[in-house]
Amino acid sequence: MNKNSRLVYSTDKGRVSPSSQNSVPSSVAVNDGIVRIGRETKGRKGKGVTTVLGLPGGEAELKAMAARLKRCCGSGGTVKDGLIIIQGDHRNALEAELIRQGHRVKMVGG
C-alpha cells in the first residue's frame, strides 16, 4: 500500500478518520495563558450562552470569577468542568472586563 494514500477503511481497525484521531475536545481547558471567550447555542434550544475557557485556578476561584462576570453582565450563569457559562451574548463586555483584570483574551468561534 502506498504511504501517501489515505486509509478510509481497514478490516483491522474499522473506520478510520484522520481528522478525529488527534482532535482535542472543546471542553478541555488549554493551559497556555490565553482566556478564550466564545458563544454557543448547541443543545440549548436556540438560546445563546457565552463561554469562558482557560481561566487559571480551581473550582472555588472559578466560581468567584463567574460571580464577578455575571454581575458585570447582569445575567445568570454557572461553572461546569472548568468552563464558565454566562446566559446571553456578552462577549464584548466579558472581553473588556477580563482585559481590565489583566488576562490575555482571545475570541473564538463565529
Image (cartoon, rainbow, N blue to C red):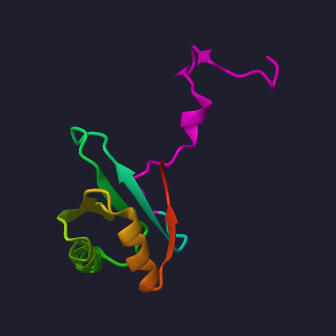
Q: Can you give x and y, in whole percent of width and height, for residue 73 in the image? A: 26, 71
In the rendered view, tell whether residue 30 sits above or below residue 58. Answer: above
Residue at x-position 33% and y-position 63%: 90
Q: Quadrant of residue 12?
A: top right
Residue at x-position 29% and y-position 60%: 81
Query: In this view, which residue lies farthest toward the bottom?
Result: 101
In the rendered view, tell whether residue 101 sits above or below residue 110. Answer: below
Q: Quadrant of residue 77?
A: bottom left
Q: Can you give x and y, in whole percent of width and height, for residue 58 in the image? A: 31, 76
In the rendered view, tell whether residue 58 sits above or below residue 38. Answer: below
Magenta region's main secondary structure? loop
Residue at x-position 26% and y-position 62%: 86
Residue at x-position 34% and y-position 48%: 40
Q: Can you give x and y, in whole percent of width and height, for residue 26 in the image? A: 43, 51
Q: Quadrant of the N terminus?
A: top right
The foreground one among 105 and 82 is 105
Magenta segment boundaries in residue numbering? 1-29
Q: Is residue 72 magenta?
A: no
The foreground one among 5 and 94 is 94
- Asked whether, in this view, residue 12 is left or right of residue 7, the answer is left
- Asked whether, in this view, residue 56 is left or right of residue 45, the answer is right
